[in-house]
Image (cartoon, grey):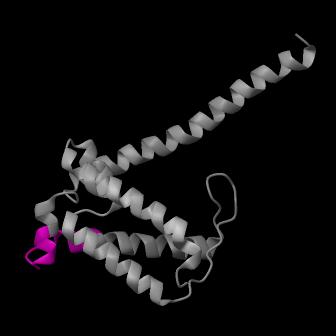
């Protein structure tokens, strides 16, 4: 065993632990997000059905609150040139409108209406033991993969 081999091994373990910690914080944030969605009843199919029938303000309030929080966050990021957790400058590039947004939004909305869940709640529903939600979750993952595969040939 050479001196350089001995020195590399601890660095690799340290690098792997650092990388593992990076994933761990996202896992913990995801669990917290799923817990919040569950407690707010956002993953409830009945709440979503109420929203599509205009019978309750619950989901509109949650979605509207998220939109307002997002607007405030974007304002603060622009106003104070905030940086990410890793210290990188956050760059907000302007988005161009194109027909693909309408097509993609329509497909997303149809999937949401059919399953009663969008991507975040799908994971929370599976985590809550609704095994049937594995079907739309796997379908969403396949759809994402197909989009990535066809992205270059789609209108943007």
Q: Report the side of 59 relative to 109 (left or right).
A: left
Q: Quadrant of residue 91?
A: bottom right
Work out whether 26 lies above or below 20.
below
> Residue at the location (60% across, 83% down)?
94
Q: How many marks?
A: 0
Report whether 64 appears left or right of 90: left
Q: Quadrant of residue 58?
A: bottom left
Q: Is residue 7 above or below residue 123?
A: above
Q: Closer to the camera, 119 or 86?
A: 119
Residue sitting at the far top: 1
**Mostly what secondary structure, the magenta segment?**
helix
In this view, the residue in front, 3 or 62, is 3
Q: Residue at x 10, y 71 (%)?
A: 50
Q: Residue at x 26, y 46 (%)?
A: 126
Q: Residue at (34%, 53%) from the top-left corner?
A: 138
User: Which x, y percent locates residue 120?
Assistant: 35, 57
Q: Is residue 71 visible?
A: yes
Quadrant where the C terminus sits is: bottom right
Q: In this orientation, which residue lies closer to the viewer: 141 or 128?
A: 141
Magenta residue span: 49-62
Q: Position of residue 51 (x, y in %)?
A: 15, 74
Q: Nearer the viewer, residue 60 or 81?
A: 60
Res. 64 in view: no
Residue 60 among magenta residues = yes
Residue 135 on image: x %, y %? 26, 53
* Residue 129, percent from left and from top: 20, 41
- In the displayed structure, 90 sits above or below 121; it is below
């Amino acid at each position: 065993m050479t001196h350089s081999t001995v020195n590399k091994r601890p660095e690799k373990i340290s690098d792997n632990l650092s990388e593992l910690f990076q994933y761990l914080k996202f896992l913990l944030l995801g669990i917290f997000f799923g817990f919040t969605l569950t407690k707010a009843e956002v993953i409830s199919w009945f709440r979503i059905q109420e929203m599509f029938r205009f019978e309750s303000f619950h989901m509109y309030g949650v979605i509207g609150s998220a939109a307002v929080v997002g607007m405030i966050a974007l304002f603060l990021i622009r106003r104070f040139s905030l940086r990410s957790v890793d210290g990188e400058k956050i760059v907000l590039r302007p988005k161009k409108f194109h027909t693909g947004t309408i097509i993609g939004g329509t497909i997303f909305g149809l999937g949401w209406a059919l399953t009663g869940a969008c991507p975040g709640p799908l994971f929370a529903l599976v985590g809550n033991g609704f095994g049937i939600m594995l079907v739309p979750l796997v379908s969403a993952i396949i759809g994402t993969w197909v989009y990535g595969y066809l992205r270059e040939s789609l209108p943007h």
